[in-house]
């Protein structure tokens, strides 16, 4: 039996080229502790991380330079997030096997949703501070799906604890403990097709509100998990995109500073 494919690993927030430090400042104003990440192996991007007590993390990422400073047909132009606007751009589930693309293809033989994944690719980065080399395998959906509607998968080839900083219940001044929800806006005319595709990818069915339950990474989390869901929201737009990420807090410690241009929307959700 194939391992589950609905464990949320991380969510990615893109900043304008060379502006990673501004993103770090914004997230610190929101009350989060931000940990330096490092430069990716391709030299095109750098990141910083917001680790959460539930084992999930936010990746703040930025290209080193604008696209027009690279030669035509450079690796920059073929990067999987080359054409994304700043804000929330993608989400990853934890890869727990070498060939998750084949697992999803096998599920879809009966459903025929049309969802397809590429073969996994090896990636990595050098960790800031100690120079530790990290390696992983990422498995992306085919380009026809775009980026950010169905997740990609990240499988650790070095221990996950090297890639993901630890966090506990008092790491963040805003009292954030973990992720509560992920909202994705999709064109109304594509909603039913995307529901079928996301169900195949995650291996679960949605509820009546078009929400799928996600699980936490299979680690010893430092917090009792809250309900964690991804929801598709029909819209009049022609594109799909992540429009909001919700953080679970147990007490009032957060600051609502709004959503400046170039940043993704953040919501704080208290106990029900």
Image (spheres, rainbow, N blue to C red):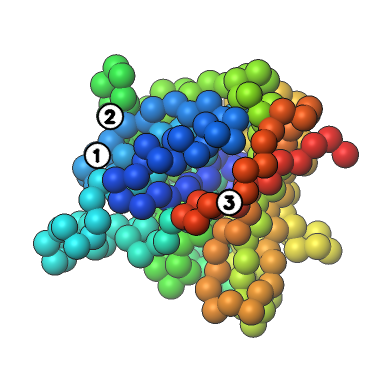
Sort mark 3 into few (<14), some (14-19) or many (20+) by Cα contacts within 10 Å. Answer: few
Q: Residue at x 20, y 57 (%)?
A: 75
Left or right placement of residue 50 versus residue 110 in this view: left
Q: Which residue is mark 1?
A: 41
**x, y percent for residue 22:** 40, 40
Question: Which one is in front in this view, the residue at disc 2 or the one at disc 3?
Answer: 3
Vertically, is 203 above or below 19? below
Q: CA distance from mark 2 to mark 3?
A: 31 Å
Cβ atoms under marks 1 and 2 closer than 8 Å: yes
Q: CA distance from mark 1 to mark 3?
A: 31 Å
Sort mark 1 into few (<14), some (14-19) or many (20+) by Cα contacts within 10 Å. Answer: some
* Disc 2 secondary structure class: strand
Q: Is residue 204 visible?
A: no
Taking the view exactly as shown, the residue that stands out farthest to the bottom is 189
Q: Picture quarter containing residue 157?
A: top left
**x, y percent for residue 245:** 63, 48
Vertically, is 248 above or below 72? above
**x, y percent for residue 199:** 66, 61
Q: Residue at x 32, y 60 (%)?
A: 82
Q: Which residue is mark 3?
A: 259
Q: Which residue is mark 2?
A: 126
Q: Residue at x 69, y 72 (%)?
A: 234
**x, y percent for residue 200:** 62, 61
Dot 1 or dot 3, earlier in sequence: 1
Q: Nearer the viewer, residue 129 or 262?
A: 262
Dot 1 or dot 2, earlier in sequence: 1
């Amino acid at each position: 039996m194939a391992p589950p494919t609905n464990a949320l690993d991380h969510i990615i927030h893109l900043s304008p080229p060379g502006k990673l430090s501004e993103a770090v400042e914004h997230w610190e104003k929101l009350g989060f502790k931000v940990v330096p990440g490092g430069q990716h192996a391709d030299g095109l991007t750098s990141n910083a991380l917001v680790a959460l007590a539930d084992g999930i993390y936010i990746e703040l990422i930025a290209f080193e330079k604008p696209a027009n400073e690279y030669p035509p047909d450079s690796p920059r132009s073929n990067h999987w997030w080359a054409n994304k606007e700043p804000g929330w751009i993608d989400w990853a589930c934890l890869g727990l096997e070498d060939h998750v693309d084949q697992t999803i293809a096998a599920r879809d033989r009966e459903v025929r949703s049309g969802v397809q994944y590429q073969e996994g690719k090896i990636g990595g980065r050098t960790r800031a501070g100690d120079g530790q080399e990290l390696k992983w395998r990422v498995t992306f959906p085919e380009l026809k799906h775009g980026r950010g509607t169905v997740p990609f998968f990240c499988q650790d080839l070095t221990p996950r604890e090297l890639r993901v900083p630890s966090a506990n219940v008092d790491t963040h001044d805003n009292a954030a403990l973990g992720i509560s929800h992920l909202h994705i806006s999709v064109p109304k005319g594509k909603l039913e097709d995307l529901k079928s595709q996301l169900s195949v990818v995650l291996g679960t069915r949605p509820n009546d509100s078009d929400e799928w339950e996600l699980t936490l990474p299979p680690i010893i989390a430092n917090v009792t998990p809250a309900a964690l869901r991804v929801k598709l929201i029909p819209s009049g737009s022609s594109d799909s995109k992540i429009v909001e990420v919700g953080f679970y807090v147990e007490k009032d410690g957060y600051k609502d500073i709004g959503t400046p241009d170039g940043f993704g929307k953040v919501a704080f959700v208290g106990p029900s």
